[in-house]
Image (cartoon, rainbow, N blue to C red):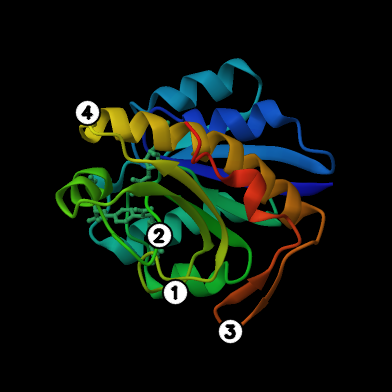
Amino acid sequence: MKNIVILISGRGSNMQAVVEADIPGARIAAVLSNNPDAAGLAWAAERGIATTALNHRDFADRDAFDSAMAELIDQHQPDLVVLAGFMRILTPAFCARYAGRMINIHPSLLPAFPGLHTHQRALDEGCRVAGCTIHFVTAVLDDGPIIAQGVVPVLDGDNADTLAARVLTAEHRLLPQAVADFVAGKLSVSGKRVQNPRSVAADAQLLV
Ligand code: NHR
Ligand code: GAR
């Protein structure tokens, strides 16, 4: 069994998708949040998953918050840490500790639109497609080796909310797949490239 610790900040729908996928060989050991009010915490607790909130506002700086978070995470002996809508930038020391075993789901087709407000930025640039990216986390924000990408169309009537909802459906399909592939030992990294036998065609949603 591989232990998985999931970090969230809010709703937690991607975390739910991973839990509900019931991935062979994977055990969701804990769900942690920097936001005590994250709706996803209650959802996970109801299902008997260990949950803890660590409010980043209670810490003097990012190093102190990340150290406390790492201590909590390590209690669960994680094979994989999943950032699923986790909204705090992590320190280089934290990223080094979980190098090669921490992934993030980001709501854009990286390297376009790292950071925040991705859907509005894609609309402002007139993009005809949008999507999500799952990548290994490195100290450089949204820059780690790409594991998988899901593509959706941008439609004429879209605003940031309608586009976000369409991208989210791709996220919910892609993240459990990526976790399953990691757990099965199917991913290997060389430089910025990840060898992933899963076909991209299965991820494309361009005929909507
Ligand atoms: N940390 C590192 N070092 N590297 C990455 O690739 C990371 C990371 C932490 C989070 C997720 C990321 C995303 O998918 C992620 C990737 C938060 C911010 C941000 O600006 C940016 C990117 C991501 C997550 N956070 C603000 C901060 O000051 C707070 C914003 C808020 O609370 O609303 O930490 O997009
Ligand atoms: C998702 O769209 C995720 O990609 C995005 O936040 C949403 C979280 O939804 N992540 C970021 O923007 C990270 N900066 P969820 O809590 O329902 O999974």
Residue shown at 32% from the left, 63% from the top: 112
Q: Which of the pair 156/169 is nearer the observer?
A: 156
> Which residue was labeled with disc 3?
191
Q: Is residue 127 visible?
A: yes
Q: Earlier in the sequence, mark 4 or mark 2?
A: 2
Of all residues shown, which one is farthest toward the top? 46
Report if the CB atoms under discs 2 and 1 are less than 8 Å apart. yes
Q: Distance of mark 4 from mark 2, alpha carbons?
A: 41 Å
| Three-letter code, disc 4 | Gly
Q: Distance of mark 1 from mark 4, alpha carbons?
A: 43 Å
Residue 206 locus on image (x, y percent): 49, 41
Nearest to the eye among marks 1 and 4: give it.
4
Looking at the image, residue 94 lies above or below residue 203: below
* Residue 81 located left or right of residue 25: left
Q: Distance of mark 2 from mark 1, alpha carbons?
A: 8 Å
| Three-letter code, disc 3 | Gly
* Residue 29 located left or right of residue 139: right
> Which residue was labeled with disc 1?
93
Quarter of the image for residue 100 reads bottom right
> Which residue was labeled with disc 2?
66
> Which residue was labeled with disc 4?
157
| Three-letter code, disc 1 | Ala
Residue 189 locus on image (x, y percent): 66, 75
* Neighbourhood count class around disc 2 (C-alpha, 10 Å): few under 14, some 14–19, many 20 upward: many
